[in-house]
Image (spheres, grey):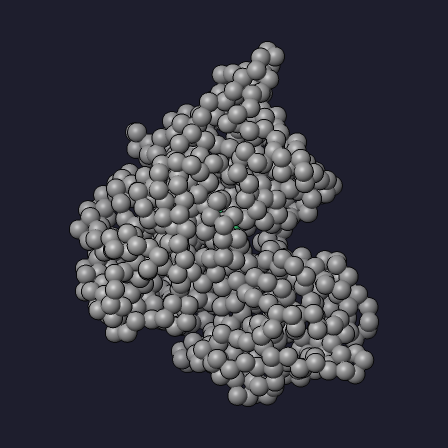
Amino acid sequence: MAFDIEMIKKVYDNLDAKVNAARKVVNKPLTLTEKILYAHLWDGEASTAYERGKSYVDFAPDRVAMQDATAQMALLQFMQAGRPQVAVPSTVHCDHLIQAKEGADKDLATANNQNKEVYEFLSSVSNKYGIGFWKPGAGIIHQVVLENYAFPGGMMIGTDSHTVNAGGLGMVAIGVGGADACDVMAGLAWELKFPKLIGVKLTGKLSGWTSAKDVILKVAGILTVKGGTGAIVEYFGEGANSLSCTGKGTICNMGAEIGATTSIFGYDAKMADYLRGTGRADVAAMADKVAAHLTGDAEVYANPEQYFDQVIEINLSELEPHINGPFTPDLAWPLSKFAAAVKEAGWPAKLEVGLIGSCTNSSYEDITRAASIAQQAVDKNLVAKSEFTITPGSEQVRYTVERDGYLKIFENMGGVVLANACGPCIGQWARHGAEKQEKNSIITSFNRNFAKRADGNPNTHSFVASPEIVTAMAIAGDLTFNPATDTLTNSKGEQVKLDEPKGIELPIKGFAVEDAGYQAPAEDGSKVQVLVSETSDRLQLLEPFKAWEGTDLSGLKLLIKAKGKCTTDHISMAGPWLKFRGHLDNISNNMLIGAINFFNEKADSVKNQLTGEYGSVPATQRAYKAANIGSIVVGDENYGEGSSREHAAMEPRHLGVRAILVKSFARIHETNLKKQGMLALTFANPADYDKIQEDDTIDIIGLTSFAANKPLSIVLNHADGSKDEISVNHTYNEQQIEWFKAGGALNIIRASVK
Ligand code: MIC
Ligand code: SF4
């Protein structure tokens, strides 16, 4: 950790000069986001003001964090960059590959056994290249980062969309694909379009059943899953200062669900408390000295409309608890309206399972608040009607809440404590009976509730709420129960009401842990060997993708015209496929199997234009590849929303898809496509989506003069001999066009090494 302190010190030592330089060029009061961004310019001090939403800017992040399911691909790429050590402090966290089945101990043992090869690979690559390694069981990446590495005013990228969690500790923390992480670890700049700024002013104070989670559930309802695209959300106001640091983390974490680049809060007393409570009093003391630069200017917060592109105001005193869902995280229902919504829509009112925890809601405060509800089940003779699981975010939190007696309370209510890992949140849930695909409801304190995500069952209606609401609902076993107003019948036949939750922000006796699960890298890793067996079905060394052939692309087949929501879970499903995250060819067998074919409304059934027969998407694409024919994928709005997994871009690349043409993209996915040498295109006129026919053969014109800000055109050759020519936009800048030409960004790094 000494390494870190030096790095943080350097950031703070330079902050004054950098913020002042930014002040000169921007020439008006600065938001916090601008201060941090301008303080992390690759070229040093600011010499020009950037245009929000327009200018591409090179940044120098301070840290990189990777989780096991994405680290494999990131590090397979990094290994080809030819560097002896990572250029910035980096860590790997083993959290996504642990399946939840019987409870923490057994599940962890099974995971260690089943994923041995992958864990050994990650541990040895980390050891070799100077990367800190957090073993399976140590906890979920974002919680571990918050507890150990995040610091106010810093900038971090991470290969997971919920990297944004660290905004709760005042950091600009952004989710990226593995190729971006690879660049930064290789000592290169990291490029981002200078974001737009959304200000969220929080007034009042939370009380009763309402918690920090409800702030983001409400914001998701206002902005929807794409409303934050291209923007950083900055929270401020007296309400912001009253939220615990981990509560701020929850808000920033789930900000990934509105497509925001990241979210952030300014440094305050709650953050200082959290830093001290997690053994970093030295960081707090350093931050205190530069505190003025770790929050937005007073003028900005006094007149936010003048400085932000959009302003939202939420009064915490009036905010109701919210429940969002099903199937999308932005369908927001205030608790008082939820029961009616359930009845009207005909969603299953019987609640099967309540799940609390995950990277976003497993703080000491969350656990103690939920436990205060669980304890009442026992005290008031209530028997929980639903199954109930608890996923602690880190071993430090788990150990501490166990020591303080909280896990016992959940167990007394019938709860099962799962491993400190993603588990059910990422479909790593061996849920009993899910294969029957029965219509049912679950409620979680996680982030995402896309179809099939938790248990693979498309008929599971998944709702998102705070841990305390989830706990109350699990006791009632009924989604139409409103804990704030309704009573329940206990085992003695009495009507009882649940009291409001009560929590403790930070453990009174302090955090404790026996083995946090950290492995420091070797001082000199040059002798460490990294082995990848040629016969492995879990890991595969990468072959460079082919460079562009130098011509327009013609004769491409339409692989699929996807209809409606097409998230990264639809493009490259997680759950059972997670085991292939280090093996590009094997994981490519899940390509787009969740996407709905516009022409027959079915998943994983597309027409093979060579045979006229319908087959699975990956098999059809493999047939085109074998015949040396390129293809194109067409999609709807916000294509690629959700995860940072670059597999969603690498699989089509590997199988020979040449372009993805959609109405709009989610940010991380668009960049991932560019990095891998794909064409990411958008309809200039979204209605042209309707012109795409099932038997189209497609040409992409204009590539020989491919240039920034210059649309390309696409010719649709229809089966009846008619044609349509449409204009398509792109957001490639000069450098990204070079990635396309080279066949992927990594080919450029490779060439620079040799
Ligand atoms: C998720 O929440 O979807 C994940 C799993 O954490 C992903 C990363 C992945 O696909 O490995 C994310 O959000 O980026
Ligand atoms: Fe893991 Fe879920 Fe958090 Fe993603 S959102 S990091 S899967 S706990």
Closer to the camera in the image, 729 or 366: 729
Which residue is depicted at the point 47% across and 81% down?
708
Name the foreground residue: 475 vs 363: 475
Name the residue at 27% across, 39% down: 273
The answer to whether 413 is drawn above or below residue 71 in the figure is above
Q: Quadrant of the C terminus?
A: bottom left
- The answer to whether residue 424 of the structure is visible from this angle is no
| Residue 574 place in picture, x, y as percent | 59, 53
In this picture, is 326 found above or below 694?
above
Tell me: residue 282, above or below residue 627.
above
| Quadrant in the picture for residue 726 | bottom right
Q: Is residue 556 left or right of residue 93?
A: right
Q: Position of residue 129 (x, y in %)?
A: 38, 62
Q: x, y percentage for residue 104?
A: 51, 36
Q: Quadrant of residue 496?
A: top right
Residue 170 visible in the shown view: yes
Count of numbered circles in the view: 0
On the rendered structure, is 702 left or right of 50?
Answer: right
Position of residue 425 measured from the top left corner of the image (x, y, whole percent)? 55, 45
Residue for point 31% across, 62% down: 34
At 47% from the left and 74% from the top, the residue drawn is 746
Question: In the current view of this chain or complex, which residue is farthest to the top?
Answer: 492
Q: Vertically, is 329 above or below 548?
A: above
Q: Nearer the viewer, residue 293 or 141?
A: 293
Within the image, what quadrant is residue 593 found in?
bottom right
In-front residue for pair 605/422: 605
User: Is 426 displayed left or right of 594 in the figure?
Assistant: left
